[in-house]
Amino acid sequence: MRPLKALLVIALAAAAPATARANGDSAIGPPTVFERFVLSACSPCIRESYPIASLAVKLQTPPGFLRVAGAAASRPGEIGIEVLRAQQFGRADWKSLALRVTLWVIASPGESYRLGIGLLDGADVQALAQAVAEMVRLATGLPANPGAESTDVEFHGGSLRIGVLRVRGEAVAYVQAGDLPTLIQRAIWEVPTTLYVPLKDLTALAAALSQAAAMIEKVRGQ
């Protein structure tokens, strides 16, 4: 139980500044420091994008509880991961960094549409990478509680949520993007901006997030 408790603490710590609403952000304005910086403190502004990975997702046989939820659970997709950097022109010390995760659904060969975009501040990306790496370890051994029908281990921050859900012995990973207070109040399978990830592919996602965290440290020093 100790690793699970540590993981939940990571999730709460990343989403709970001193003055916070349900998703850990100020009561007004965008959910990330990066967005607020771009809107109010970066003009003229230089914005850069550093692609990290594009992960194909194909959930061929979703767990039974997702099959009941609908066909959307088995749709193939893609997860784009990149690092964003914004800097006020002429001021190398005045900058902000973030992780951007873009979710795509593949409708047919050569045809795709964007499902959602999640942002997380650069300062929180290392914690996310560590949390997802821990989820990989826990995925096949989530602590069982005889009285619980489902177990959800997740990390949330900014406008991004990643976790592993187990219902009646079947498990699947998921990535969600959007307004966190809305996402958290609904059942995972009721959120339309959800891309389900087979547990076997969670390792690749954790590795990509670790690469993003390393890139943020590299870009921060430039």
Image (tube, helix red, strand yellow):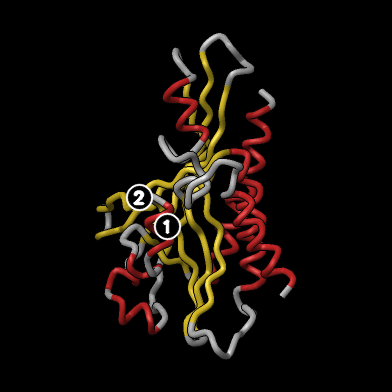
Taking the view exactly as shown, the residue that stands out farthest to the bottom is 146
* In the displayed structure image, the side of residue 122 where residue 31 appears, left or right: left
Secondary structure of the residue carrying numbered label 1: strand
Q: Give the amino acid at mark 1.
A: Gln
- The answer to whether residue 212 of the structure is visible from this angle is no
Point out the image quarter for the C terminus.
top right
Q: Nearer the viewer, residue 6 or 203?
A: 6
| Residue at screen point 59% across, 12% down | 91
- Earlier in the chain: of badge 2 and badge 1, it is 2
- Residue 192 horizontal/vertical position (percent): 31, 61
- Residue displayed at 50% across by 73% down: 165
What residue did someone put label 1 on?
A: 176
- The vertical placement of 64 against 127, above or below, is below
Residue displayed at 50% across by 39% down = 51
Numbered circles on residues, count: 2
Q: Of the residues shown, which amino acid type is indicated by label 2?
A: Gly
Of the 4 image quadrants, the one containing the N terminus is bottom right
147 to 111, vertically: above or below: below
Residue 100 spot, x, y in % from top left: 47, 42
User: What's the mark number on residue 116?
Assistant: 2
C-alpha span from label 2 to label 1: 8 Å
Residue 18 location, quadrant? top right
Could you tell me residue 59's position as x and y percent? 40, 71
- Asked if residue 99 is positioned above or below residue 108 in the image, the reply reads above
Instruction: Identify which residue is drawn at 56% across, 9% down.
Output: 90
Q: Quadrant of residue 137?
A: bottom right
Q: Are marks 2 and 1 in contact (CB under 8 Å)?
A: yes
Image side of residue 121 versus residue 175, left or right: right
**Residue lying at the far top of the rendered structure:** 90
